[in-house]
Image (spheres, rainbow, N blue to C red):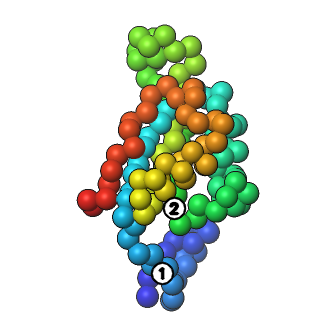
Amino acid sequence: MWLARGSASMFPGVVVEFKVLLHPKPALIRSRTSFFPVDRYPLIVRKFHEHATGAGGNYSDKLELTLNLASTPPPLAEAAGIKDPKLVMVIETWMAESEDEFQQLTKRFWGDMAMDGDLASLALLPLSSL
């Protein structure tokens, strides 16, 4: 049994059962962190919504997404000439069986949006050795 804090500070919940869904390890795992100006937020949220609902294709076992809103520290924003220091940070982790499948998935997911407007991007790092 596991005791967890519930909906109020004095109301704990008790977990008595949970199920785990396992997937085989994919041959290829890649991750990328990208930063966009905050005005791209609506487009990025649309992509996240399409992913979550399956409207843009079913990526449920191929993609994990994280979206963060952040601010560039003022001295860095000034030095970079950024007027609005608010940023959207997108972390995408892809699982594929081959490099070709990976390229097709990312192109299909981002579509015409691609990575245009990306202020900075940390490359899609191979994580398959983990």
Frontmost residue, 2 versus 84: 84
Identify residue type, mark 1.
Val
In the image, residue 99 sits, relative to residue 17, either above or below, namely: above
Label 1 neighbour load within 10 Å: few <14, some 14-19, many 20+: few
Q: The C terminus is located in which quarter?
A: bottom left
In the image, what residue occupies the spot 46% across and 53% down? 100
The residue labelled by disc 1 is 20
In the picture, the disc for residue 62 is 2
In whole angstroms, how far apart are the C-alphas of marks 2 and 1?
A: 17 Å
Which numbered mark, 2 or 1, is in the foreground of this view? 2
Q: Report the side of 8 relative to 3 (left or right).
A: right
Q: The N terminus is located in which quarter?
A: bottom left
Looking at the picture, how far across and down is residue 38, in whole percent?
Answer: 61, 29
In the image, residue 36 sits, relative to residue 104, either above or below, namely: above
Which quarter of the picture shows residue 129?
Answer: bottom left
Q: Earlier in the sequence, mark 2 or mark 1?
A: 1
Q: Is residue 91 visible?
A: yes
